[in-house]
Amino acid sequence: MTATFDIELRVLSCEKCGAPFDAPPDGGSVACSYCGVVMVVGERRLAAVRPAHALEGPARIAKLRMASGRPLPENPYSTVTPPPGCEGLTQAGLRPVLDQLAQRFREAVALVRVQPTFDHQRLLWWCATQLNQGYGMHGEHRSRRGVLERAIEEVSDPGFRHLLFVNLAGAAARFGELDAAREWIAKCDPSAEDIVLDSGYRIGLAGVLACSGEHAAALDVVGARSGEVPEAHQYRMMFAVYRIHAFEALGRLAEALAAAREMGRDPIVGHLVGEALRLNELAPRTRAALGSPA
């Protein structure tokens, strides 16, 4: 059986119908097996994200802490604020919304090819991110692979490519393809100077480590306490989720419960902690202790 997220394979979404198809690494003419359209694809673009950084070590962490713990909707790498015209496309789990997102994604691919502005690239990335979630909820894993890899090959901004690699790593880990997950996460920038990019990487890496049974390492990545490592505000729930799961997996149930209750006091999303654990299939004993459905 062929692995869905094997990094040695090249899987793209069709430019006409959006269906996933296999493409040769060197490019060429390829016919979509779903709609029959013939596409010419270029050479595969899979270089790791390794931008030059002005800050390293403690200086980088200090910069990240300055943006930690507060909403950053204006951050271009945040998914909180949709691109113009996409305000009604945030519920990707709904099939009509998913279909609209797929159409918008194909339109964004065409826009980026004609005029690869930052805003056009952000639109393409945002649609790919939402499609990744929606296809994952519907169990359409090859489709999520196709849109993520298509987006990686179309955008040039290192931040967007970084987050798309994070998405692929997380999808592969959740699907049980751990070798592929490690290879995708290795494509990311491990030393980002932007708080959203750094937190996204930490969450992606924590997911890979959790699925691999490396719970102590996952706890180091997200921190044993809220604020121990810089956290982008939009990711605070996922930091807590992996922290709770790591504690439970390490046999430290009291600390898992304490972390869950601390997250539960968040005035905006605290009431969702049990649901977040359930949706991510993590920390079952903590969920039971909280009274959340199994």
Image (tube, grey):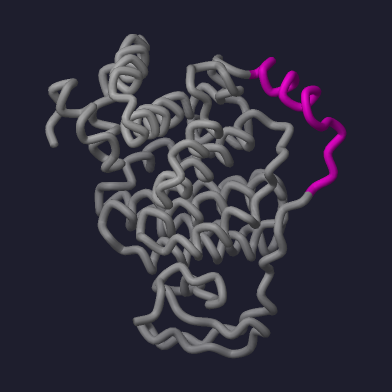
Q: Position of residue 116 (x, y in %)?
A: 71, 55
Residue 62 shown in magenta? yes
Q: Residue at x 65, y 57 (%)?
A: 187
Q: Image quarter for residue 269?
A: top left
Q: Nearer the viewer, residue 118 or 244?
A: 244
Q: Position of residue 148 (x, y in %)?
A: 51, 60
The quarter of the picture where the N terminus appears is bottom left
Residue at 27% of width from left, 24% of height from top? 272
Compared with residue 100, is residue 274 higher up or lower down, i.e. above or below?
above
Residues 145 and 34: in front is 145
Q: Residue at x 41, y 64 (%)?
A: 177
- Relative placement, left or right, of 103 versus 148 is left
Would you identify the image quadrant in which residue 32 lies? bottom left
Image quarter where the C terminus lies is: top left
Residue 131 visible here:
no
Near-viewer residue (219 or 45): 219
Compared with residue 41, is residue 56 higher up or lower down, i.e. above or below?
above
The x, y position of residue 218, in whole percent, is 49, 38
> Which region is colored magenta?
51-67
Instruction: Give above or below for 243 relative to 42.
Output: above
In percent of width and height, residue 235 lies at 48, 29
Q: How many marks?
A: 0
Residue pictured at 57% horizontal, 33% vertical: 199
Magenta stretch containing residue 151, yes or no?
A: no
